[in-house]
Amino acid sequence: MTVGVDHSSESLAASRWAAREAVRRGYPLRLVHALSEDKAGKSQRDSARELLADAEGKLRRQYPELSITTEVLTERAEDALVKAAGESRALVIGSHGVDRLHSFFLGDTGLHIVARAQRPVILLRAVPEETEAEEGATGGGGIAVAVNLQGSYHGLLDFAFRSAQVSGHQLYVVHARKLMAQAYAPTGSVVPHIAQEIAEEEKQKLADVLKSWSQEYPDVHVTGRVRLESPARAIVRQAVGSNLLIVGRRRRDRPSLGPRIGPVAQAAVHHAACPVAVVPHD
């Protein structure tokens, strides 16, 4: 597991979260700091090494059993972290700008990393350490994962069930879809019995999907939830109070189109009030 380290409080939160997860999963932890080539002089390199050494020291005091390595990467931050993600089980980075009245994750660099990385990227906001300890403990709001039953979801559920298993958290699998036009009366109001029929049908589909996963992960307490609304809105609401929100991002064959991550992932990384894991899938 790799974490991008800089001087921000968000980065410190990311490193602590990554260390805790690495211990739970039995992974080594790699701390990296990127310097562009035009800013990689001796003094900048020395400063970067001191930054990483300080972060490593703090983590070793808390997790003495954890295997930690550090590395200064001489490359543009976005490219360096995308490459680091490809070499890791997951990449953890801090978020900048945490005012819930505005976008939750604001940095263009973070968005480009999420859009290009071939492994899961977890984004963390800065919170007090005591709050982290409470959120990281078994219980709390659990882990939520957004799935589209009409799309690809195997990789998402695999990541979600593994995360719930190692953390001991409750897992909520959320499937949302908008109501079709036939569910509305001419006045524009929802026809209750049609909406109920659609909800029951979707609940059965979700239960059928989760049955085999529950057999594979019998220790994970999983609950399926169907929401008849915009998937983006449903998952942001589910994120409130959650320990982790997991969403998918479809890999694209034409990266030149720019940092496109899909409407649900876009809503999650900009508005979810909890850590967000974006998992790429085919």
Image (tube, grey):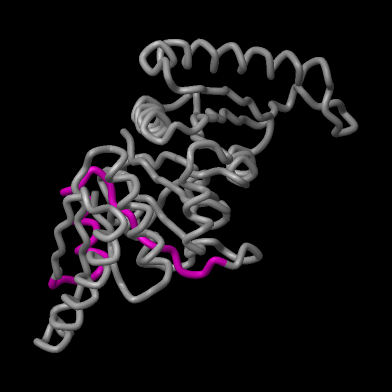
Q: Is residue 42 left or right of residue 230?
A: left
Seen at 54% across and 13% down, the residue is 207
Seen at 68% across and 29% down, the residue is 228
In front: 50, or 274?
50
Seen at 54% across and 30% down, the residue is 172
In the rendered image, the residue lying farthest to the left is 42
Above or below 28: residue 231: above
Q: Give percent across and percent down for residue 63.
A: 28, 53
Q: Give percent across and percent down for residue 112.
A: 34, 60
Q: Determine if residue 35 is in view.
A: yes
Q: Give percent across and percent down for residue 235.
A: 58, 41
Q: Is residue 76 magenta?
A: yes
Give the residues in magenta.
74-98
In the rendered image, the residue lying farthest to the right is 187
Q: Determine if residue 254 is in view.
A: no
Seen at 24% across and 48% down, the residue is 1
Q: Is residue 165 magenta?
A: no
Q: Give percent across and percent down for residue 216.
A: 36, 14
In front: 97, or 248?
97
Residue 50: quadrant of the picture: bottom left
Above or below 22: residue 39: below
Task: Please state, as top left, top right, bottom left or bottom right, where the C terminus lies in the image.
Answer: top left
Q: How many discs mark residues in the rendered view? A: 0
